[in-house]
Image: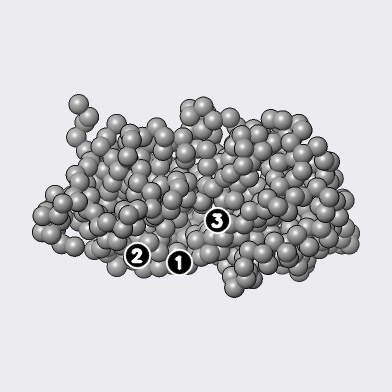
């Protein structure tokens, strides 16, 4: 639709700001600008993006973002009167080749893993070396970080035994969506391995009561009525002399137009490429490097109340080996902090290549295979998991933006504004909730500075 046609349409609305996408980044931006005339368009029938939760207030699951790990997001949650639950006292867990081990320190965990001692020693040496490298990043110059980012994580890890490389690579893939061979050395270390290499990180990690989506839900509820429009499909975004013109179809399929002074685009990279017109070639090239996203498949398994389970007291447990999932998360650990009688939910996560295994299979096949594997690791699963309430969520090519070698080099181009269109999302910043939240606040600041003061 041209600007001329928009001017004569019956379905044209003028606003100060239009935000595209109601995930963490878009809603952070909208919440920061809530005193303005603002509209948020969201393609899904819910807010939250990759924060997706369900269950009850004392027994819940996350099938997207799992944890709060940054002070900024924790402070935001508390300002919204959302309860955070520490995981600092949880045991460490690891599944290696189908055998579960746990310990209240990394050293005890390693000692209990069922693997040859020479493999344990090799893995310990590699992990300590990577931990030192991780801790050195803060003091690195920009050039040093760029050099680390230009190499793959596999190159940074260096020569280790195949078993150690498999364990480190699987940990990276479950957190970053890419194996060590395909991930940036910088982002692979910080986001792919950071939580597993540095045991002190769990002192600053929290679960959200009711699920991580509570944060995005609370921000959406704080906006003016009809500000957030769900099931809205953005078809075209273009600059005009007066601002930004957004053409979309509402939940009823009616074509509508928003004329905004400023636009904040919090869409995934592939949606940006499909809808935003007039982008410079270097930005298009950088966005193309960020497609496709890696796939994720999350499964929530209800645990019967009043039953003891072998995973009680463990919160997260990486999985390395032939299983079809990379990570086990015990949301029952959080539920028991609220109500000791609740079983909560266990969740399995398949990322990257393991998620791709299920692309052509239906949800029942996912449940059948993963439950067989869970039962092989934990025979008690047969008596404590209630298969009637299992929930499967697929993020096909929509899970995690790929942070390949050289990602930092292109990040400023991806984030750079195009006229009055400003971009945010974890792919424009650091991965995960911290990057989404931080980039949303940054975009809101740019827009706030561009607009006249509120009277």
Mark 3 lies on residue:
187
Mark 1 lies on residue:
291
Of residue 250 and residue 119, the one placed in the foreground of this image is: 250
Question: Which of the marked residues, 3 or 1, is nearer the chain's N terminus?
Answer: 3
How far apart are the two marked residues, 3 and 1, measured between alpha carbons? 17 Å
Q: Residue at x 54, y 48 (%)?
A: 52
Above or below: residue 285 compared with residue 241: below
Asked if marks 2 and 1 touch (Cβ < 8 Å), the reply is yes
In this rendering, does residue 416 appear at all? no
Q: To which quarter of the image does residue 164 belong?
A: bottom right
Question: Which of the marked residues, 2 or 3, is nearer the chain's N terminus?
Answer: 3
Q: Residue at x 50, y 44 (%)?
A: 434
Q: To which quarter of the image does residue 332 belong?
A: top right
How far apart are the two marked residues, 2 and 3, measured between alpha carbons? 24 Å
SS for callout 2: helix
Q: Which mark is residue 273?
A: 2
- Counting the numbered discs, the total is 3
Mark 2 surroundings within 10 Å by alpha-carbon count, few (fewer than 14), some (14 through 19), many (20 or more): some
């Amino acid at each position: 639709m041209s600007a001329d046609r928009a001017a004569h349409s019956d379905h044209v609305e003028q606003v100060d700001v239009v935000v595209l996408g109601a995930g963490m980044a878009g809603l952070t931006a909208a919440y920061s600008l809530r005193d303005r005339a603002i509209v948020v368009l969201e393609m899904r029938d819910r807010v939250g993006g990759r924060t997706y939760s369900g269950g009850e207030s004392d027994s819940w699951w996350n099938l997207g973002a799992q944890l709060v790990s940054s002070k900024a997001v924790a402070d935001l949650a508390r300002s919204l009167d959302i309860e955070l639950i520490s995981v600092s006292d949880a045991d460490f867990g690891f599944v290696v080749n189908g055998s579960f081990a746990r310990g209240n320190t990394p050293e005890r965990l390693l000692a209990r893993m069922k693997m040859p001692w020479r493999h344990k020693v090799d893995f310990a040496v590699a992990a300590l070396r990577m931990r030192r490298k991780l801790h050195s990043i803060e003091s690195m110059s920009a050039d040093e970080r760029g050099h680390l980012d230009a190499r793959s994580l596999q190159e940074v890890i260096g020569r280790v035994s195949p078993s150690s490389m498999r364990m480190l690579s699987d940990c990276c893939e479950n957190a970053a969506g890419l194996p060590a061979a395909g991930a940036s050395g910088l982002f692979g270390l910080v986001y792919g391995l950071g939580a597993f290499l540095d045991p002190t990180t769990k002192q600053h990690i929290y679960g959200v009561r009711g699920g991580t989506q509570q944060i995005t839900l609370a921000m959406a509820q704080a906006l003016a009525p009809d500000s957030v429009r769900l099931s809205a499909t953005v078809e075209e975004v273009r600059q005009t002399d007066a601002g930004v013109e957004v053409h979309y179809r509402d939940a009823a399929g009616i074509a509508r137009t928003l004329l905004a002074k400023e636009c904040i685009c919090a869409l995934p990279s592939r949606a940006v490429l499909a809808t935003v017109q007039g982008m410079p070639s270097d930005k298009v090239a950088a966005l193309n490097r960020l497609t496709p996203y890696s796939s994720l498949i999350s499964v929530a398994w209800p645990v019967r109340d009043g039953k003891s389970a072998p995973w009680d007291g463990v919160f997260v447990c990486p999985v390395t080996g032939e299983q079809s999932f990379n990570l086990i998360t015990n949301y029952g650990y959080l539920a028991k902090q609220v109500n000791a009688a609740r079983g909560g939910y266990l969740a399995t996560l398949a990322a990257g290549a393991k998620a791709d295994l299920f692309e052509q299979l239906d949800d029942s096949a996912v449940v059948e295979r993963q439950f067989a594997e869970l039962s092989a690791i934990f025979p008690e699963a047969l008596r404590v998991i209630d298969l009637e309430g299992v929930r499967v969520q697929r993020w096909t090519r929509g899970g995690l933006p790929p942070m390949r070698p050289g990602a930092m080099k292109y990040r400023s181009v991806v984030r750079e504004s195009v006229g009055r269109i400003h971009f945010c999302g974890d792919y424009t910043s650091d991965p995960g909730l911290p990057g989404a939240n931080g980039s949303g606040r940054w975009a809101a600041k740019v827009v706030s500075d561009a607009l006249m003061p509120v009277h």
